[in-house]
Structures are given as C-alpha cells and as structure tokens.
Amino acid sequence: MSEKFDCIVVGAGPAGISCAYELAKGGANVLLLERGEYPGSKNVMGGVLYRKMMEDIIPEFYKEAPLERPVVEQRFMMMDKESAVTFGYKGMEWSKEPYNNFTVLRAKFDQWFADKAVEQGAVLVNETVVLECIVENGKVVGVRTDRPNGDVYADVVVLADGVNSLLAQSLGFHKEYKPDEVALATMEVLKLDKKIIEDRFNLEENQGCTIELFGDATKGILGTGFLYTNKDSLSIGVGTLLSGLIKHKIKPYELLEYVKNHPMIRPYIQGSEPQEYLAHLIPEGGFKSMGKIVGDGVIVIGDASQLVNAIHREGSNLAMTSGRMAAETILLAKEAGDFSESMLDLYRTRLMSGFVGQDMQKYKDATHHFDKFPHYFDEYIPMLNKAASQMFTVDGSSKWDKQKKIWKDIGSGKDKMKLARDMYRAWKVIK
C-alpha cells in the first residue's frame, strides 16, 4: 500500500468499478478500495441494469455476466388500499439481443464486474475504510485508510463512496444532506420457484418483468415501491424520503411489510421464502443538491455526486457513465501531466453536456415539487382508483351517469380548478 498510484478509486460500486476498469484498460496504475467484504456486499439497488451504459464499457457483457432476466415488460401500479390502476408496456423486441435492461442481484454482478477490472490490471483491496483524503497545498494527493501504515498516494483520487460521501463533504464539496434530499430504500430478496415466477407474471423462460408501485405502497409518502423478477427469486422493496418517514413516524421495515401484505402484491409473492434483507440510502436531491464534483487532484462520481434520476428510477446507468467519463478525463490528464482542477473539469463539462446532465436538469424540480404537494399520492391516486371502479362496475347505470358522478365527486368548481392546476404543475416539472 506504500506504492504511489496513478489513481485511487474509493468505492467498488457501479461508478467506482467502471472508472477503475477504464483506467486500467487505458494503462493506468489504479487502486480500487472497497469497505465491504467484497464488491456488492454493501450495495443495494432495486435491481435493474441498463444494457447501453454497461455495454459502452464492456461490449456484449450480457453474454457472460451473472444477470437474472432480460426485462420484457415494465408495469406501473397506482395503488389504493384495496385497488390498483395498472398500465405498462411489454415488447418482444426486448427479449432479443442486445436487450434493453436486465434484473440483477448486486452481490453477484458487482463481484463479476470488479473481477473484470482486476483482469485489466486494477488492484482491488476489500475491507478497507478510507478515513480521509490527504491534502497538501490545497491538492488531494492520496487517502488515509484504517489499515496499519495505510496512507496511499496517487495523482488523482476518485470518490465513489456513495450518497453519504463524508470524504467529499470533508473537502467542502457539499453540505450535509437534509432528510428531504435522501431516500431510504429497504429491500428483500424472496426465494421462489422459477416456473411459479413465470406463471404468475405471464413470462416465458428467460423473460423478466418489473412493477413500479405508487401511492398506497408508500402510504402517501413521496417514494416508490418495486417488485422485480429474478431467475428463481423476487426483489421487493420500497424507498421513501427520510423526511416522510420522520414526519409520519414510520419505520422502514414496517413499510416493507405493509407492501408485502398489500392485497395487490400478496398473490405475487405467496409461498416465497425470505433470503436476504438490505437497506441503503439513495440520493434524491437531484440537480439542485449537486455540489462541487471536481477539485485539484480529485473527482466525485455516481451517488456521491447525487447522480440519480428518481423519476425514471435510474441510478446505476448514470453512475457507470460518470465513472467512464471520469476515467477518460484522468487518462487525458495523465498524458498531459496536469491533474489540476482546470484540467479535470473536462469531466464535469462532458458529464453535464451529455444525457446525464441533461436529464438531471430536466427533472431538477420534480422531487421538491412532489414532496411539497403530497396530495398527488394521498388524494389523486385514490381518486383515480375510485373513478376506475365506478366506470368499470356494471350496475345498471349509464356510462353518462357514471361520468357525471365522477365529475361531481371531484368536488366544487374550486376543487376542479385546483386539480387542473396541479396536473399542469406536475406536467411542467416532468415534461
């Protein structure tokens, strides 16, 4: 550990491994540090991996990576206590190579991905906690670890240590995040026979389905639940803003149990056996919560820089892209022999001008808007379910009479104007 490296990457998640892989592939001497027992042991995500961003790093990775199922159907449930309005898309073009996305189990996938980085020449050291960055004359020159004689030096340090990123905070790159800028996701992996999964979700062999859950799944708190199919297990979870959990005095595991026992979800998981329980913080502040991501001798990537698109439940793809772009910038800096902030700022420029930055800016107001107006979840979704029930119940009333009743149930003219105004505001923040 006394050796000096071209780059030290802190954190072996999708962002950190992507960066280490590209650096090693480009001939750089890179050290990848992971605090867990192995890559993936401390990492949690809903379980969807997008093909395009991963293939930009390893072409045709899906032919050998430990993936679960290619996703052919994406469903969305607007849930009330005993009902759900469901819509989605199923396409057989997603069942063929090169596919669109996959369900994955991080403990398996991250280990495989990290091994690929090691094959390229990266040095992976697990069970190592980075205590602080070593700063000399305003420049980050290495990291201090919890190992004996654990100071390690490098030309560039990449911080991929997740949403908490105390390292970036200690450098003054961002403030301590507030409860309304961070979500807590709890998830269980449930063992279930492969054939039962395919029958219940109307799938053929080697096909997957994802279901996103809104409304009563989070008891009206801003957030989503999810149910994803793996080969012989299901991933079920729920993530909500910390501020909502605090305000409503709900414990995360209680919310997960509520989702598991919801009448719209219970039939899907019946007969399954709990296999693994995980919890993880997710950045939700978006573009407005992004701090500084480049300094002299240091770059911040992935969750550590708030790169999550909560509206489209995208995180790992943004993380991998940021890791790849950081590596490309560092290789250019190595060639120029310049690791200053002005040189490394090429990473920030490229990131923010590409799809990552464009999507972050597009949805910059979404989380704050829906958190400020919780009635989208606790009023309007139940209203939608009630209207659907009335419209589809055959009871001798004409459809015209049903429509008039639905319109009347919305309330007064003032209530209707409020609904129209809220729908317009929602459209403005996600358009």
Image (spheres, rainbow, N blue to C red):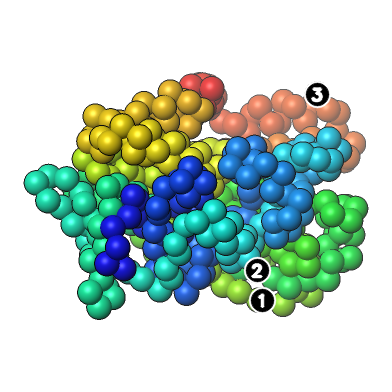
Mark 1 to mark 2 CA distance (whole Å): 6 Å
Mark 1–mark 2 CB contact (< 8 Å): yes
Mark 3 to mark 1 CA distance (whole Å): 48 Å
Residue 201 relative to residue 347: left or right = right
- Report helix, strand or loop for mark 3: helix
* Residue positioned most to the left: 137
Question: Which residue position is annotated with label 1?
Answer: 274
Q: Is residue 270 visible?
A: no
Residue 174 relative to residue 401: left or right = left
Question: Which residue position is annotated with label 2?
Answer: 189
Question: Which residue position is annotated with label 3?
Answer: 400
Count residues near mark 2 (Cα–Cα under 10 Å), then give few for <14, some for 14-19, many for 20+.
many
Q: Amino acid at mark 1?
A: Pro
- If the image is split into quadrants, where does the N terminus sit? bottom left
Q: 112 or 102: nearer the eye?
A: 112
Q: Which residue is rendered at x = 63% and y = 34% of the image?
A: 409
